[in-house]
């Protein structure tokens, strides 16, 4: 049987991807950011997941205002890095796991979560930056990746509670997949940030710390946070944090936080990163 062994959350700051790609990870501004992932890279090299279900949001690269799926699951064989305006990142092509992805789509849809099935799409920094942070610079990503895109760009995004419950549906789906697979679920985006408008640059460390605590120890309370609270407290792009709830719902309630990293600033955001392990 497939099983979910661990969960990861991390910000997906595009500028961090650019820093990695330009070889700037050692410089004074960026090195404190990458320090927070040193433990994580060692940990994941030992854990060796077979598949990562990577919850992220597309930033108008694959989905534009022409097409806005609330939840979209990548069921294809592979996904290329998207050109977001400056050429595609020179990172490996993402290899999918179509059998597990279709199984999750079927299970979740029959459980009344109407996922959009995507066989062909490019993946932007929301997906590739977390891979770079966790695996470093690689010739090939060391595991299969199932992209799960969430609309957090165009109002109305799903509620946090809907995301938390989708996570539970994903857990059920994975646990009924007959193949023996070590699966991780990652929730990306956040933390507090606003990239545009009058409040551009807003960072709220008090809210971020509370959110890290809630997602770890009281995810039901985190799931009750309304959209407007994210926007007031964490800025317009802080709403990306609802994606962390999908990861948390997919893990057991008693999953243990084994790593936490929080750093300000990186580009216009606060970096937040957690690792959870399910009980063995
Ligand atoms: C940046 C991009 C993002 O998508 C995000 O969520 C935070 C920061 C950036 O490039 O600075
Ligand atoms: Fe983003």
Image: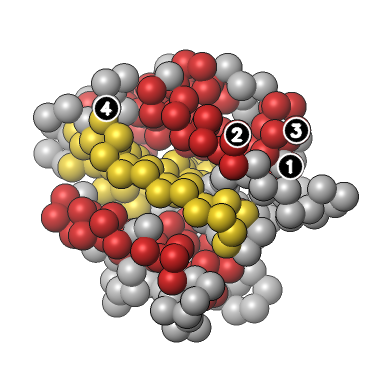
Residue at the spot x=21%, y=60% of the render? Answer: 42
State the separation of the CA atoms marked 1 and 2: 14 Å
CB under 8 Å between callouts 2 and 3?
no
Q: Which mark is residue 207?
A: 2
Quarter of the figure with residue 100: top left
State the separation of the CA atoms marked 3 and 4: 30 Å
Local SS, label 2: helix
Question: Along the line of sight, which residue is nearer the eye, 228 or 131?
Answer: 228
Q: Nearer the viewer, mark 3 or mark 1?
A: 3
- Beta carbon at label 2 within 8 Å of ligand 1: no
Residue 173 higher or lower than 31, as above or below: above
State the separation of the CA atoms marked 4 and 2: 22 Å
Local SS, label 3: helix
Q: Residue 103, how many percent across, how many down? A: 32, 34
Name the outermost residue toward the right. 198
Q: Which residue is mark 4?
A: 255
Residue at the spot x=12%, y=39% of the render? Answer: 180
Q: Which residue is mark 1?
A: 236
Question: Along the line of sight, which residue is nearer the eye, 258 or 187?
Answer: 258
- Beta carbon at label 4 within 8 Å of ligand 1: no
Q: Which residue is mark 3?
A: 232
């Amino acid at each position: 049987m497939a099983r979910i062994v661990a969960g990861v959350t991390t910000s997906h700051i595009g500028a961090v991807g650019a820093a990695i790609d330009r070889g700037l990870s050692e410089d004074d501004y960026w090195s404190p950011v990458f320090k927070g992932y040193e433990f994580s890279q060692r940990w994941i090299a030992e854990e060796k997941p077979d598949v990562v279900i990577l919850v992220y949001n597309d930033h108008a690269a694959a989905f534009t205002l022409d097409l806005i799926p609330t939840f979209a699951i990548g069921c294809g064989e592979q996904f290329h890095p998207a050109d977001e305006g400056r050429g595609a990142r020179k990172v490996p092509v993402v290899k999918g796991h179509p059998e597990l992805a279709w199984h999750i789509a079927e299970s979740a849809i029959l459980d009344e979560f109407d996922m959009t099935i995507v066989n062909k799409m490019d993946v932007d920094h929301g997906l590739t930056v977390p891979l770079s942070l966790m695996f470093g610079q690689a010739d090939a990503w060391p595991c299969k990746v199932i992209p799960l895109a969430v609309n957090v760009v165009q109002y109305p995004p799903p509620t946090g509670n809907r995301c938390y419950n989708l996570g539970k549906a994903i857990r059920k789906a994975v646990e009924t997949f007959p193949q023996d697979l070590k699966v991780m679920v990652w929730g990306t985006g956040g933390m507090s940030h606003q990239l545009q408008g009058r409040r551009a640059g807003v960072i709220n460390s008090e809210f971020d710390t509370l959110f890290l605590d809630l997602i770890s120890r009281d995810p039901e309370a985190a799931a009750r946070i309304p959209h407007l609270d994210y926007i007031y407290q964490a800025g317009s792009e802080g709403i990306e944090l609802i994606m962390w709830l999908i990861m948390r719902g997919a893990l057991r309630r008693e999953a243990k936080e084994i790593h936490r990293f929080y750093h300000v600033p990186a580009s216009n955001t606060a970096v937040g990163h957690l690792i959870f392990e399910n009980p063995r």
